[in-house]
Image (spheres, helix red, strand yellow):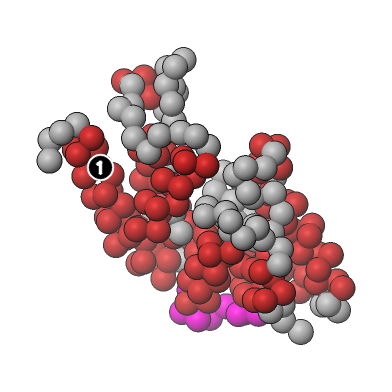
Amino acid sequence: MELSIEQARAFYPGDDPVHGFDHVMRVYRIAERLGREEGADLEIIHTAALLHDSRGADPRGEANEREVHHLLSAEFAETVLTEMGWQPERIEAVQHCIRSHRYRAQDEPPQTIEAMCLFDADKLDVLGAIGAARTTAFSAQADLPFYREPSQRFLESGEHEPDELHSAYHEFLFKLQFVHERLLTRAGRAIAQQRNAFLRQYFEQLQAECRGER
């Protein structure tokens, strides 16, 4: 029995523009697309996508929970799927996808094609037009600006000056411009190429407008 979209919707806040259910459904659709192209098990992909941010991912929550939201979500997935009567080996397949989807977590890299598809789909959602919108929304949630001129120290090392705010543009320089290099599937890399080019152009235009150059 596959977890339904309507069942999963109840696990997410209705007002989170960054890790809410809109994000989940975009990841669901892209992961399915990648899974079809890569010959993956779509039931595993669908279920992992629907549960991958189900616990602790809300940026407005506790920082310690956000850091381990992939682990909390995997534990929650076990509870949900056990109650639905899933076999242990398929539950573990879903859990591996969820545990290995986080960009900054290196303790359990994706090993299965399903996990690779979820990882890539989640990363594709920080690229392109959606990536620009989500990064700006995250900055607003955190009471941070969408643009500040980065210090020379940040440009050289990624470290902030004591009074330097981490704007959406900082996040592009620190993380987003490198995300496409981490993708694992052929299909995901093909999509990332165009999305990354758009995102780079967007932030270049943003900087130029903020400087009064365009």
Kind of residue indicated by mark 1: Leu
Q: Is residue 173 visible?
A: no
Residue 79 colored in magenta in the image? no
Residue visible at 12% across and 35% down in the picture? 213
Q: Is residue 43 above or below residue 150?
A: below
Residue 87: x and y, percent?
83, 77
Horizontal and vertical percent for residue 196? Answer: 32, 55
- 119 displayed left or right of 6: left
In this view, 136 is above or below 115: above
Indicate left or right for 178 with 123 as reference: left
The residue sitting at the left extreme is 214
Q: Main secondary structure of the magenta part?
A: helix
Vertical comparison of 207 with 124: above or below: above
Q: Magenta span has 37? A: yes
- Report x, y in % for residue 82: 85, 71
Q: Quadrant of the N terminus?
A: bottom right
Identify the residue at horizontal 34%, vertical 58% (top origin).
Answer: 129
Q: Nearer the viewer, residue 22 or 158?
A: 22
Question: Which image quadrant for residue 91?
Answer: bottom right
Count the numbered circles shown. 1
Rendered view: 51 above or below 55: below
18 relative position to 149: left or right: right
| Residue of label 1 | 206
Work out which quarter of the rendered image holds the C terminus and state it.
top left
Q: Determine the secondary structure under disc 1.
A: helix
Find the magenta span and give its range.
34-43
Near mark 1 (Cα within 10 A), the count class, few <14, some 14-19 or many ≥20, is some
Q: Residue at x 50, y 81 (%)?
A: 36
Residue 64 or residue 93, whichever sits in front: 64
